[in-house]
């Protein structure tokens, strides 16, 4: 139901995903029958592993997720995440409200120990496709210990999903030295040093496209501003470039999420992918393939193991 | 003395500036005699309004400016800023230590009332050459009232230097609504609403290259990360673009400071321009021309008037 072009692009994306991921991906499409059925009829689904699961109502971005949760207990996000909880699905993909996906995930699947709310992260710059940024919008005014948890989650993602063998972790700050930064990053620095993670110290804006760091940890306030700034620059630059092909290249160099379709919620006990509201069927198909990969590599399990190991090292 | 290529590029930049700004710009070059004199001898200075003022020693980026101030009382930054204080110069331009320029300016010229330390700001994206970012690195963990002062300084800069008639002010945050942001921006919002400034609300990363806002206010922590991130992207993208000319264009689209040579210290009672350490003679020449313009338009005086007016509106 979600996304600016749902369910039209969502259904087309599902068809593309099962076709591309033949034998690997089956899709359960969750949504209002009167909106989804007409879209399903536009495709030839014969022999394709696509099933329709009816839900009632949608939780919008403008709603308080917790209130909507009570008012619309059969909303698509709740039914969709519920499919994981009940064992019918391995992963949930949504282009709808991030808040709704977060609330449904936290309540139905549960959070990993010590994690308060789902975190958002992943590569956000096409020029640096293996550099993970965490957090990028769900956690604002973080405590230093939360930043350290994000580091562990990011390390698990980098190792499991991006196949980086010993991910280097940096704190995003305004100078390389330990004494540089704001209160939050200065307090986080010694925690990172004592964490047993492969901590390379503070990194700066200069390091974002270099090869100094694999996991860049920041408060969601900073990460979200950066994420949106890169999107804005990508759009601005691609308008500027005369040849459309070059423009598209430049755009992709800056916008990784568009390219990969979406990113997982970190810290949730299950695989939930939140995509871009503006995603087309191609982006949605990518997000479904991404979800399959997360499930196959047991990302959530790897993240929980990394967190547990971190806590043991700190306690020891 | 300062800058990665000083004094060679600095002297060449001074020659370029007085040649380009004929009749408008005269330059006093401050530095160690044994370093500067050989460079002066490489140029034909006959008839050019360039004079050499000897100083002793340099305050380095790695030093504590306040300690260096006592240890090297004749250092180039101190002698240079002193030329303004003594009425021999209208503006001071440096490619050297920002900390040294800030300390010398604060101590010798004094700060505007209620401003604790010099602030850094200006356009930082070539795609948005009239969009002022303030603060971008000198003030970290700002109080909301400091953000409001920055807004007034940025408005004066936008109106006086960029000739925007009624500059629109926004707070950089993670959502357009008043309730979105971190503690700092949420507390700042009502202060901005009551300020009498042309406040358009929160702006996001998406708005950086658009036409919604003229003065973007943020904590120096966020501003500095953005500034360096844009530089990093510009370098990364221009390496990616195959044609060198396109690469240079893309680089300039992202790096405004390189293009304009440097930015003024805001809140100081005098015109002090801090340039990029890596600036070439072209960048240095631009910075000198910028300094002349700041002096001609009486930017510092306009800033102080804007601050006084702001305080009167708030008190009233």
Image: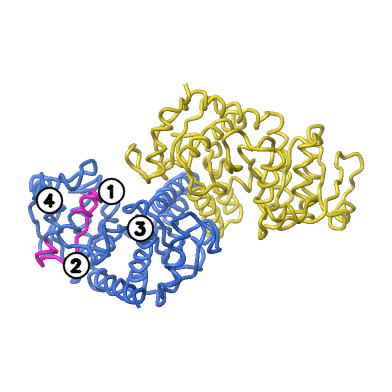
Chain colours: A blue, B yellow
In this rendering, position of residue B156 left or right of residue B32: left
Residue A7 in sight in this render = no
Residue annotated with mark 4:
A31
Give the chain of mark 2.
A
Any mark on residue B170, and which? none
Residue lying at the far right of the rendered structure: B46
Q: CA distance from mark 4 to mark 3?
A: 25 Å
Q: Quarter-wise, where is residue B271 in the image?
A: top right
* Mark 4 or 3, nearer chain start: 4
- Residue B124 position (above or below residue A202): above
Cα separation, mark 3 vs mark 2, equals 19 Å
Name the residue: 23% across, 41% down.
Answer: A62
- Give the vertical position of A277 relative to A217 (above or below): above
Residue at 17% from the left image edge and 67% from the top image edge? A90
Q: Is residue A89 magenta?
A: yes
Check if mark 3's residue and mark 1's residue have beta carbons within 8 Å.
no
Mark 1 surroundings: few (<14), some (14-19) or many (≥20) residues within 10 A: some
Location of residue B270 in the rendering, given as x and y in whole percent from the top left corner: 69, 36
Query: According to the image, label 2 marks what residue?
Result: A25
Residue stretch rendered in magenta on the structure: A83-103
- The tag on residue A259 is 3
Q: Earlier in the sequence, mark 3 or mark 1?
A: 3
Q: Which mark is residue A277?
A: 1
């Amino acid at each position: 139901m979600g996304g600016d072009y749902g369910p039209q692009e969502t259904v087309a994306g599902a068809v593309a995903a099962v076709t591309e991921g033949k034998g690997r991906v089956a899709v359960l499409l969750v949504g209002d029958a009167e909106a989804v059925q007409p879209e399903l009829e536009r495709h030839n689904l014969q022999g394709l592993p696509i099933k329709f699961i009816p839900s009632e109502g949608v939780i919008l971005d403008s709603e308080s997720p917790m209130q909507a949760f009570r008012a619309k207990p059969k909303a698509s996000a709740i039914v969709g995440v519920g499919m994981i909880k009940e064992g019918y699905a391995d992963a949930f993909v949504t282009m709808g409200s991030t808040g709704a996906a977060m609330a449904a995930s936290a309540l139905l699947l549960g959070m990993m120990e010590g994690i308060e709310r789902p975190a958002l992260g992943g590569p956000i710059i096409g020029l640096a496709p293996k550099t993970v940024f965490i957090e990028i919008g769900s956690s604002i005014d973080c405590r230093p210990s939360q930043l350290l948890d994000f580091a562990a989650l990011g390390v698990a993602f980098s190792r499991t999903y991006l196949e980086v063998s010993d991910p280097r972790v940096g704190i995003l700050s305004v100078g390389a030295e330990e004494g540089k930064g704001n209160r939050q990053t200065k307090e986080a620095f010694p925690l990172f040093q004592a964490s047993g993670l492969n901590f390379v110290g503070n990194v700066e804006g200069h390091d974002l496209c270099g090869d100094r760091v694999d996991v860049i940890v920041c408060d969601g306030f900073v990460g979200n501003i950066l994420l949106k700034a890169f999107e804005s620059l990508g759009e601005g630059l691609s308008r500027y470039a005369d040849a459309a092909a070059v423009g598209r290249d430049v755009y992709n160099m800056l916008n990784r999420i568009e390219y990969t379709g979406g990113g997982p919620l970190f810290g949730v006990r299950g695989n939930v992918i939140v995509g871009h509201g503006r995603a087309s069927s191609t982006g949605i198909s990518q997000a479904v393939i991404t979800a399959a990969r997360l499930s196959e590599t047991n990302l959530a399990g790897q993240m929980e193991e990394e967190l547990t190991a971190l806590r043991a090292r700190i306690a020891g």
